[in-house]
Image (tube, rainbow, N blue to C red):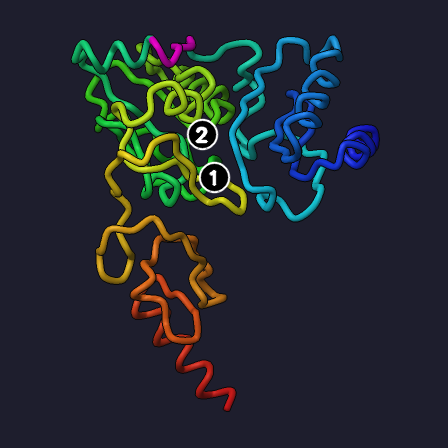
């Protein structure tokens, strides 16, 4: 961990990385020259020589600092120990193969393994949203997925493909048979096929909040307050809620606060009144 922190500092990089026994996963930002130097550094380590590295543009303000942490898991699923994607996971389908499935009109469903608030701003056609707020909730959603999929071929998707490794493994463990996962995630698909079969924009866990590769796309996100089309993510200003959700600029209060519901607005008003 300290070695990586030192390398990032020398190269002037910022971002975050999680290191676990399973491997490592991170996103970093810097100049093209220095990010490529770091890619060479990582790929030069024999443990990571086959690592997939994705690239996208930013404005230099995506990450405020360096954050490198050691965790038990790359994704906090807390699944049973035998759910190990290094031993068994769903077969990978490339972006090209998935695009062909859509083009041919194949009968399949997309199970989006992201949190529901991520799916709100963008998703594939034929998407099933299991209704999760955290990856560890997937075992509770298995029956719902089974009911919605109705025995069809399942394609699991997530932002960069990391979550799907373990989450598709859990579906296989639960008796699902015709299960696949999108290789390298939604990011790689919309980069190769912008505006095709994926509607809206891609949520990101950094200061950008959303990203896309085309201006010719529908806005599918809806404001929690008025249902107006929007992709403006905000944290609910009620600290007892703090839900990350879409709230359009028209529904943000004059003091710049956003609330996900009238109940949260009323609760904060009552608390402020009591404080006074």
Give the residue at x 62% y 30%: 26
Horizontal arrangement in the rendering, residue 77 relative to residue 19 (left or right): left
Q: Name the residue that disc number 2 marks.
A: 159
**Residue placed under numbered mark 1 in the picture:** 204
Rendered image: mark on residue 142: none
Secondary structure found at label 2: loop
Q: Quadrant of residue 20?
A: top right
Q: Is residue 181 above or below residue 140?
A: above
Please state, as top left, top right, bottom left or bottom right, where the N terminus lies in the image: top right
**Callout 2 touching callout 1 (CB < 8 Å):** yes
Query: How many numbered marks have been drawn onto this rendered protein structure?
Result: 2
**Residue 99 falls in which quadrant of the image?**
top left
Does residue 154 lie above or below 20 as drawn? above
The magenta stretch is 91-96
Q: Position of residue 127 (x, y in %)?
A: 26, 29
Quick one: 128 or 137, which is closer to the camera? 128
């Amino acid at each position: 961990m300290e070695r990586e922190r030192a390398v990032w500092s020398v190269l002037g990089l910022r971002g975050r990385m999680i290191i676990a026994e399973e491997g490592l996963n991170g996103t970093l930002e810097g100049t093209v020259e220095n990010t490529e130097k770091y890619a060479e550094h990582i790929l030069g380590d024999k443990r990571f020589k086959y690592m997939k590295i994705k690239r996208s543009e930013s404005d230099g303000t995506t990450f405020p600092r360096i954050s490198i942490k050691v965790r038990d898991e790359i994704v906090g699923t807390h699944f049973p120990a035998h759910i190990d994607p290094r031993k068994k996971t769903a077969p990978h389908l490339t972006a090209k193969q998935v695009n062909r499935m859509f083009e041919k009109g194949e009968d399949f469903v997309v199970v989006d393994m992201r949190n529901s608030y991520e799916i709100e701003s963008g998703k594939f056609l034929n998407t099933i949203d299991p209704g999760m707020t955290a990856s560890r909730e997937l075992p509770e959603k298995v029956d719902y997925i089974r009911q919605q999929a109705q025995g069809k071929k399942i394609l699991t998707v997530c932002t960069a493909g990391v979550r799907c490794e373990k989450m598709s493994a859990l579906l296989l463990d639960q008796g699902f048979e015709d299960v696949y996962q999108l290789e390298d995630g939604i990011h790689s698909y919309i980069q190769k096929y912008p505006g095709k079969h994926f509607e809206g924009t891609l949520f990101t866990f950094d200061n950008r909040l959303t990203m896309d590769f085309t201006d010719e796309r529908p806005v599918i996100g809806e404001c929690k307050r008025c249902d107006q089309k929007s992709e403006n993510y905000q944290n609910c200003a009620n600290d007892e809620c703090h839900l990350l959700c879409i709230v359009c600029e028209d529904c943000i209060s004059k003091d710049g606060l956003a609330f996900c519901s009238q109940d949260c607005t009323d609760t904060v008003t009552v608390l402020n009144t009591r404080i006074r």
